[in-house]
Amino acid sequence: MKKIGVLTGGGDAPGLNAVIRAVVKTAISMYNCEVFGIKNGYDGFLEEGGIVPLGMEEVRGILPRGGTILGSANRGNPYARKVIRDGLEVTVDVSDEIVKGIKKLQMDALIVLGGDGTLRIAHELSQKGVPIIGVPKTIDNDIGGTEATFGFDTALNIATEALDRLHTTAESHHRAMVLELMGRDAGFIALQAGVSGGADVILIPEIPFKFASIMSKIHERAEKGRKFSILAVSEGAKPQGGEQVFSRRGDEIYVPRLGGIGQVVGEYIEKQGFESRVTVLGHIQRGGTPTSFDRSLATRYGAAAVRLAAKDGFDRMVALQCGKITDISLEEATAISKRVKLDDDAVITARNIGISFGDE
Ligand code: F6P
């Protein structure tokens, strides 16, 4: 193994830089290998100056830094890229150009840090002969075959702190405070932060809710003298028989953007005569320094990805299973997205301690 590439695709997540650092350090010190960073996801293969050498100097001091020193792109799907041809904007498949670019560079491996979209593309490029290894990244924790994606723990900590802060102001003003959290179609952030942050109601996409049930919980608390309530609401949550709320519809380039269910829930509570306020935590969950857990997991993933490349373990993704780093095929990792199971211990525990999922 002489030359490897590393790229970061899709939405950023705390820990990306920690993975890049571990890849560079392991590749250089263990395999005496050259490392190249591909800028802005797969786009770097198509852009002038899109590929940069990464040495020890370039990764010095980046372990605690959020974001990615390589940049990312969540419009970077090589199978559907918008380009201007003959003065017109058209969508084209540039995957073959990317494959050619990778082959021309004579890279022995390409390590791709991404969520389900980026990893699906990685699997497809693998089918075209690109030697790819995936690393599971996303605050949503929704990638199959791994117990944890890096970035999730940091998002959880931020969401938990937000719930703690909402608690004190909720109590002072006797309000229902709604916190809308990210996670797309998976409720892991709202569920786990909701439990850790003492939410009274948790709404997640996997458990469609009834508005009336939310109000019963708020009234039940008020009757006991607790005249405030805290609601942790996944952006992908939806009412029974209803639809998810989007702030922007998707197209062939952009995935649909979820957002607005917190406001819907808050307005409903107000209409029922109970004062409410809504906070959308948004990209605060993705920014800033990774937690110790994420730094460590990201470092373990980065080093493991290089070891896997050294033994030609391509078209595979590093994963965490039973607390140990292992690897699974990219096909398996991307086949079924991970979701909260209704018999998950965290769901049962939440119900046991009186948290409502708005479904009863
Ligand atoms: O997948 C990570 C994530 O942060 C989701 O939780 C959220 O729905 C989405 O990305 C937001 O994407 P963008 O950065 O494009 O607004």
Image (cartoon, rainbow, N blue to C red):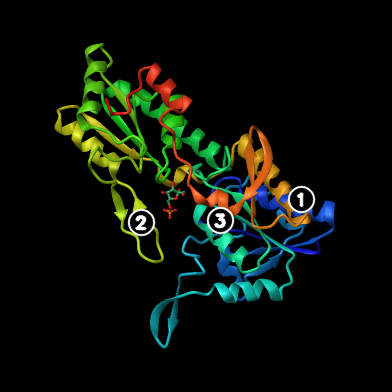
Residue 323 placement: quadrant: top right
- State the residue in front, 350 or 20: 350
Which mark is on residue 238? none
The answer to whether residue 121 shows anywhere in this view is: yes
First along the sequence among labels 1 and 3: 3
Cβ–Cβ under 8 Å for marks 1 and 2: no
The residue beneath circle 2 is 256
Q: Secondary structure at mark 1?
A: helix
Q: Residues within 10 Å of mark 3 (few under 14, many from 20)?
A: many
The CA span between labels 3 and 2 is: 18 Å
Q: Secondary structure at mark 3?
A: helix
First along the sequence among labels 3 and 2: 3
Which residue occupies 45% across, 31% down?
A: 193
Residue 211 point in image, percent of width and height: 21, 32
Residue 29 point in image, percent of width and height: 83, 52
Residue ranking furthest to the bottom: 86
The residue beneath circle 1 is 307
The residue beneath circle 3 is 119
At label 2, which amino acid type do we have?
Answer: Pro
Mark 1, mark 2: which one is toward the viewer? Answer: 1
Callout 2: CB less than 8 Å from ligand 1: no
Which residue occupies 81% across, 60% down?
A: 33
- State the residue in front, 194 or 103: 103
Callout 3: CB less than 8 Å from ligand 1: no
Cβ–Cβ under 8 Å for marks 1 and 3: no
